[in-house]
Image (spheres, rainbow, N blue to C red):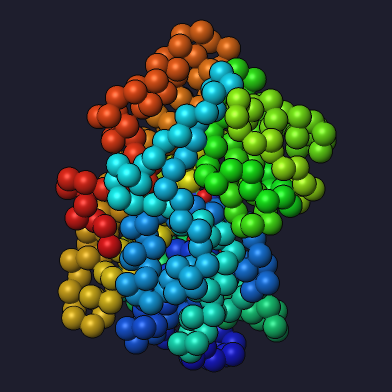
Amino acid sequence: MINPSPTSAPAPRVPVVIIGAGPAGLTVANILRAASVDCVVLETESREFVEQRPRAGFIEEWAVRALRHRGLADRLVERAQAHSECEFRIDGEQHRFRYATLTGDRHFVYPQPLLVTDLVREYAVKGGEILFGVRDVALHGIDGDRPTVLYTDPRTGERRRIDCDIVAGCDGARGVTRAHVAPDRGTVARYDYGVGWLALLAEAPPSSDCVVFGVHPRGFGAHMARSPEVTRYYLEVAPGEDPENWSHDRVWSELHARLSATGAPALTEGPLIEKRVLDMHSYVVEPMTYGRLFLAGDSAHLVAPIAAKGMNLALHDALLLADALVAYYLRGDADGLRGYSAACLRRVWEYQEFSRWFAELLHGPSSGDPFRAGSARARLRRILGSPAAAATFAESYIGKVTGPMAMTTP
Ligand code: RFL
């Protein structure tokens, strides 16, 4: 569909250009292709890179249902493990929290690279076009009715141009599309948690059948399954800390200390195949649209991975955007596009608020501030002791949406 034409020749015209082949961009692309709405995806990295980049692992059941409904979750449902409980460890004791019993919904453990691989394959099967390895993507005219997207073709090094109606900005936290909305055409709300998390991937089988949150005065620690061979761990550290300060032995001794509890099996150690420090911060761009540009996923909002929400939100945006675009192209109905930003932002803020609330429970006891520590412990006791508090926590933890927000569940 995209002619290898120099910028001087007539530019190809495609209804929708999608920038970024992450979960958000690929979901939009697949749904458009299935509805015969033409689109093209531009991605800076190679196919191999995006199919291997390790990140998320926990997908909420509403998102799995929505993907399945669109024929995008067959392999996920076949291969993912479902989790219905999590566990808190504090003062050497284990406390199981059975959220699926309270909500009816579970998490599906499916590493993000597998989901991306499935979505790339499915899109290719439908004849969809992705250009990997493009450089210097630039948008023009998004406030008019004929936007153009420029990029450098990796095969020839030449500058190319595509004319389109709509640009979907799905290029993540480090992309270029967000700059067209923020800061002068909208607001960017930011929050810095003031802590770092050492994010680790260990070549070791999970040591528990569920997510484990270690709430400890030395700092928070967590265990999350990824696959039968690989487990993700987190350790709270100082922001900006150099991961090289954390040797194999130091990591494992700290994980043992922060995740220990009477009766809990010892952690199975293994080589650390990823070790990086995340400075825990979040942002939200409002509105998520400007002219013909629609942001989706991390390009519009970053949620620190405290409650494993980022990819789930990216999928929520993508499903809403794709459905709105299909309604626009097939039925001439622009209501979905007009209401897109507001519909996304309701869930975005719900998840941001929950992540911040949960973060205080996890970080308070190690803050060095006795008031925060005491409050955090009270928060945890309430979840574990009060059925009403447990139900509220469970709904937010699994992303079960009730009330007016339920209307935005795709
Ligand atoms: P992505 O996945 O970053 O994809 C954006 C794509 O755009 C490309 N790109 C460009 N392409 C063209 N032109 C440009 N100028 C471009 N600039 C960038 C990038 O190469 C990339 O391919 O964004 P998307 O689709 O919005 O998806 C968001 C999720 O990736 C993210 O929210 C999650 O990974 C967050 N997250 C988690 N979310 C969950 O829901 N559950 C989890 O369990 C979970 N665990 C995590 C996480 C994030 C983590 N890190 C690394 C911050 C665990 C970790 C450690």
Rendering coords of residue 135 (x, y %): 64, 70
Relative horizontal placement of residue 236, taking residue 118 as reference (left or right): right
The residue nearer to you, when weighing 250 against 310, is 250
State the residue at coordinates (76%, 29%). 253
Say if 231 sits above or below 131 in the image. Answer: above
Q: Please indicate, yes or no, whether residue 368 appears anywhere in the rendered image.
A: yes
The quarter of the rendered structure image containing the C terminus is bottom left
State the residue at coordinates (29%, 46%). 103
The residue nearer to you, when weighing 272 against 26, is 272
Rendering coords of residue 311 (x, y %): 47, 55
The residue nearer to you, when weighing 52 against 186, is 52
Rendering coords of residue 196 (x, y %): 62, 32
Say if 176 sits above or below 304 in the image. Answer: below
Relative horizontal placement of residue 361, taking residue 159 as reference (left or right): left
Rendering coords of residue 240 (x, y %): 68, 32
Relative horizontal placement of residue 98, taking residue 192 as reference (left or right): left
Image-quarter location of ligand 1? bottom right
Relative horizontal placement of residue 282, taking residue 62 as reference (left or right): right
Q: Residue furthest top?
A: 370
Say if 200 sits above or below 69 in the image. Answer: above
Q: How many marks?
A: 0
State the residue at coordinates (57%, 90%). 5
State the residue at coordinates (37%, 36%). 354
Q: Please indicate, yes or no, whether residue 11 appears anywhere in the rendered image.
A: no
Say if 6 sits above or below 25 in the image. Answer: below
